[in-house]
Amino acid sequence: MNLNGLIQKFRALFPGDKTLLLSSAPGRVNLIGEHTDYNNGFVMPLAIEHRIQIVFCPNASNMVNLYSCNYDEYDSFILPVKEKSEKQWSNYIRGIYKMVQDDGYDVAGMDAVLHGNIPIGSGLSSSAAIEVAALMAVDYHNELNIDPLSQVELAQKCENQFVGVDCGIMDQFVSRMGRTGCALLIDCRNLTCRHIGIDPGLVIVIANTGIKHNLIDSEYNTRRQECQAANRLLKVASLRDLSPETFDKKKHLLSDTIRKRATHVVNENQRVLDVAQAFDDSDFIKAGQLMYESHYSLKDDYAVSCPELDIMVEIATSIRGVYGCRMTGAGFGGCTVSLVDNDGVIAFCEIMKVSYKEKTGDFPDIYITTPSAGGTVIEL
């Protein structure tokens, strides 16, 4: 659905001569740095062109009235928020209102129609996008003037405390702070970032396995608990505190499973820094090699891949013009991200589709994207 269709839907559901506003926020793909954000480590995501859009108007009441075009469902709730909805998509917006009110802000309700073209359950952070878009809408129409970093933290709290996923801050950070043409090197400990320019001769290609995951029901929270166990046994505040060399001297203190989880996190943090340097040096071969290393670590040490993701990476290794490929997102399904030379994109898409179909029986959805801007609010 395009923006005109979204506006028409709003006018039909909420008639009247109202000035409408549009809040939108992007999904993200993570080039490298998986499962490091909740370990206070380093990540390198970029905002993608796929977005959540919310057309809204304040209604000067204590009612929030919502309609999701994707689900063809309505939901309404009274402020202050007291309970969750059975409609999961609504809880991302309910949670935002609750976090803002719990922070001491007075807010009024709104009428809103939302639509997104981020594939749901694909690991491209549709949840963070709706949280950021909703928060920016609430902030704007209530004139709260919450600074961007605090918005990021509130959106993360929504996911942690209301939705129930113990995620790190990466997804909300890049959805709010993304910049056109750049990836973000984010330090998840001190919440600073550096913009890493992506050479225009490179193309970011996302391939969707079609295997959906649900982080609330997955082993995501278990992985976080395993990392916390490693912290206790190694007597560090975070695995971020360990260099690969220091970890090698202490890893014998861990059980086999916990050691594997910690091995991934410690080495992944170093890989992120090395990829950032490789982009600075225009060494795309090095960056791609590190992406492959990241995938195999996620498969073997962190155990969050799946056969379909592994098949995609295997296919990518055989295609000319591909520098690197890896699973992206929390895992257990979702997508791969590939770094491809501009001249090789058409061949990549054709070969990936045909080869994946031969091996799995299904054609993958493939998205070509460029680093995009973060969340915005405009008057229509």
Image: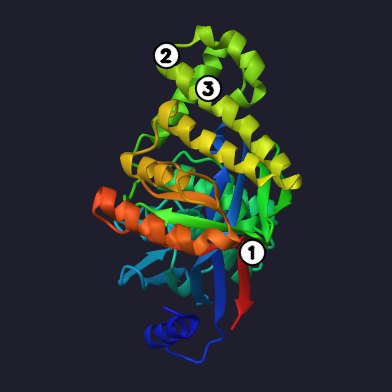
Q: Mark 3, residues whose alpha carbon is within 10 Å: few (<14), some, or many (≥20)?
A: some
**Circle 1 sits on which residue?**
373
The amino acid sitting under disc 3 is Thr
Which residue occupies the foreground of this view, 114 or 283? 283
x, y (%) of residue 274? 68, 35
Query: Is any atom of residue 102 visible in this view?
Result: no
Q: Residue at x 46, y 61 (%)?
A: 347
For the residues marked 3 and 1, what is the alpha-carbon distance in whole angstroms? Answer: 33 Å
The amino acid sitting under disc 1 is Ala
Task: Find residue 70 and report its image quarter.
Answer: bottom left
Is 333 placed above or below 228 here?
below
Q: Residue at x 76, y 44 (%)?
A: 281
Side (left or right) of 248 relative to 159:
right
Looking at the image, tell me whether mark 3 or mark 1 is earlier in sequence order: 3
**Circle 2 sits on which residue?**
256
Q: What numbered label is drawn on residue 263?
A: 3
Disc 1 secondary structure class: loop
x, y (%) of residue 336? 45, 49
Task: Find residue 219 and report its image quarter.
Answer: top left
Q: Residue at x 53, y 22 (%)?
A: 263
x, y (%) of residue 74? 33, 71
Q: Contact, CB < 8 Å: mark 3 with mark 1?
A: no
For the residues marked 3 and 2, what is the alpha-carbon distance in whole angstroms? Answer: 10 Å
Is 201 placed above or below 189 here?
below
Task: Find residue 178 and report its image quarter.
Answer: bottom right
Query: For the C terminus, which image quadrant?
Result: bottom right
Q: Nearer the viewer, mark 3 or mark 1?
A: 3
Q: Residue at x 41, y 32 (%)?
A: 299
